[in-house]
Amino acid sequence: MAEITAALVKDLREKSGAGMMDCKKALTENNGDLDAAIDWLRTKGLSKAAKKADRVAAEGLVAMAVTDNGAGETASAVEVNAETDFVSRNELFQNAARAIAKASLGVDGVDAINAAKVESGETVQELLTNLIANIGENMMVRRSAKFSVPAGVVASYVHNATAPDLGRIGVLVAVESTADKAKLRELGRKIAMHVAATAPLSLSSDDLDPAAVERERAVLTEKAREEGRPEAMIAKIVEGQINKFQKEVVLLKQPFVMNPDQTVEQLVADTGKELGAPIKITGFVRLALGEGVEKKTEDFAAEVAAVTGG
């Protein structure tokens, strides 16, 4: 039986990130073989991950990454979820989120991100599995978005930043132009801050989800009837309200938050004239942490009453 020294346990802990007692047990089970002990811990980590997979992971971080392509740029935003807000302040988790965002620059979609390799050589899924074993919470890459422009910038903005490029709301805005990149980034960041504040549904009217328009039309039509508007006038009234609705939810039609007398579309056009080159916003995304995830609510008073019979 090989001697399990404190130095060997420390070495395994540094390599695996697992707890001290787990490392000691792994070495004991594998007769002091460091590589075998690492595999044993990873197997144990997989078991832990499976047990935690049904827990709701609605906290975590939105991480951003950007790479320069010469005249243009590629940028990515990734939502990496955990179970508690506490984990988002954990340096290991923050570093993992940054690594995942960087790895996502070269692929598309969550499955491809999970299979992509981070700089350490392990896949994103392996990185998360080891982190789950170390921290003890369910974690996952929930969704991602990526934009590329052949010329121009993809500006990013993180609202309520926990650390650089990490926070609860992440916004990307693709700004295509041959104008000065520093000036374009300034414009893009302003628009990204606008997007964070207003949460538009689409870039242009043509991009607006027809189902969202019809849903709004149905609500407005029913409201007009309840208000006793003449049936012959309802269609015209609703059409005017739909136009107003589009100005509220379509990015380019929205009044710019920093200057409500100017729409975002006018801001872009005016900046293009000022810089001497046309500017086009080709896309945007706003990822809000936990958006759409149904969180489990605990009724502790009811649980206590059930146990005590009170």
Image (cartoon, rainbow, N blue to C red):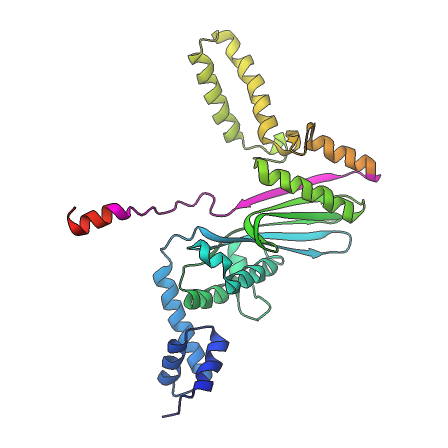
| Residue 77, above or below 102 | above
Residue 28: x and y in percent read 36, 85
Query: Nearest the camera: 174 or 266?
Result: 266
Residue drawn at (78%, 52%) of the image: 71
Magenta residue check for 58: no
Residue drawn at (51%, 57%) of the image: 111
Query: Nearest the camera: 16 or 19?
Result: 19
Among the 4 quarters of the image, the one containing residue 129: bottom left
Residue drawn at (48%, 67%) of the image: 126
Residue drawn at (53%, 17%) of the image: 238
Among the 4 quarters of the image, the one containing residue 201: top right
| Residue 118, above or below 209 | below
| Residue 199, above or below 216 | below
| Residue 121, above or below 59 | below
Magenta region, residue range: 275-301
91 left or right of 157 in image? left
Residue 230: x and y in percent read 48, 6
Residue 29: x and y in percent read 35, 83
Residue 161: x and y in percent read 57, 51
Q: Quadrant of the N terminus?
A: bottom left
Query: Nearest the camera: 141 or 199?
Result: 199
Residue that extends furthest to the right in the rendered view of this protein: 276
